[in-house]
Amino acid sequence: MGQPMMDVQERRLVGRVLRASTVGFDCGTRGSRLDDLHTFGAFVKTPIGDEQQGTFAIGLIYAIRIDDDPLARELVMASMVDNNALIDQRENRMVPVEIGVVNVGYGVDGGLIQSLPPRPPMSLAQVELCPVEEVYQFTQKCDFFRLVINAKEVPSDELIAAAVRYASWAYPEAERYEYSVRCGRYLARLLSHDLKRLAHVLELIKPSRADRQYAT
């Protein structure tokens, strides 16, 4: 079986906030830093207001965008491209990679709440992966599924399935099956009016070998 790839004692910086609302936020990072921290369905968090207050938004990565720039367009059109030029463009480009995050909860006073945060994070606030213990604690309930399903411009079915598979690695192996069943039962109630969609989401939740790369 796969193992969680994140050292729970290590802060794992995903990026910094570019723009935000209470519904979600976009953060940016250098293209050369794009790695297993930037995973579709990953749980991330960022402080709200003064970081010392301990209040933070919790979200799910739902999109990773790599926009072009004038130099990238020029290199694409070139008949031959020097490998050093490609490396330099990826590492030193002025346009950041953007990561879209939909908010599904927040932390305050040591507790985790599955609801939209009371206010958005500030620009340039650090965004990092939620540690394993927070993912485990947060996913004891499935109420955040409703926020994902109702979110606009989000691939909600795929995102819920990815989040479930991602979160499963925060659970001891003996608890993973029970966790998946609990999620499936909640989805059955939530999507009882749309059986085709329900069947699709449940099929997506099934674990695969690719899930071993997920980090919590």
Image: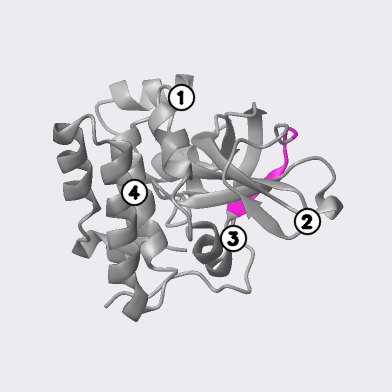
Magenta part of the chain = 122-128
SS for dot 4: helix
Q: Confirm or deny contact between disc 4 and disc 2 (CB under 8 A).
A: no
Does the magenta segment cover residue 156? Answer: no
Disc assigned to residue 186: 4
Going from N to C along the chain, the mark reached first, 4 or 2, is 2
Q: From mark 1 to mark 4, how far is it between C-alphas? A: 48 Å
Going from N to C along the chain, the mark reached first, 3 or 1, is 3
Compared with 214, 26 (above or below) is above
Foreground residue among 119 and 96 = 119
Residue under the image location 58 percent in, 63 percent down: 134
Which residue, given by chain and number where applicable, does mark 3 sit on?
12
> Nearer the observer, disc 3 or disc 1?
3
Which residue, given by chain and number where applicable, does mark 1 sit on?
71
- Please name the amino acid that badge 4 sits on: Tyr
Expressed as whole percent of the image width and height from the top left, the position of residue 30 reads 55, 43
Q: Dot 1, how many residues are within 10 Å of its Cα: few (below 14), some (14-19), or many (20+)? A: few
- Please name the amino acid that badge 1 sits on: Leu
Expressed as whole percent of the image width and height from the top left, the position of residue 141 reads 48, 55
Going from N to C along the chain, the mark reached first, 1 or 4, is 1
Q: Confirm or deny contact between disc 1 and disc 4 (CB under 8 A).
A: no
Q: From mark 3 to mark 1, how far is it between C-alphas? A: 30 Å
Expressed as whole percent of the image width and height from the top left, the position of residue 72 reads 41, 26
Q: From mark 1 to mark 2, how far is it between C-alphas? A: 47 Å
- Please name the amino acid that badge 2 sits on: Asp
Q: Confirm or deny contact between disc 3 and disc 1 (CB under 8 A).
A: no
Foreground residue among 13 and 160 = 160
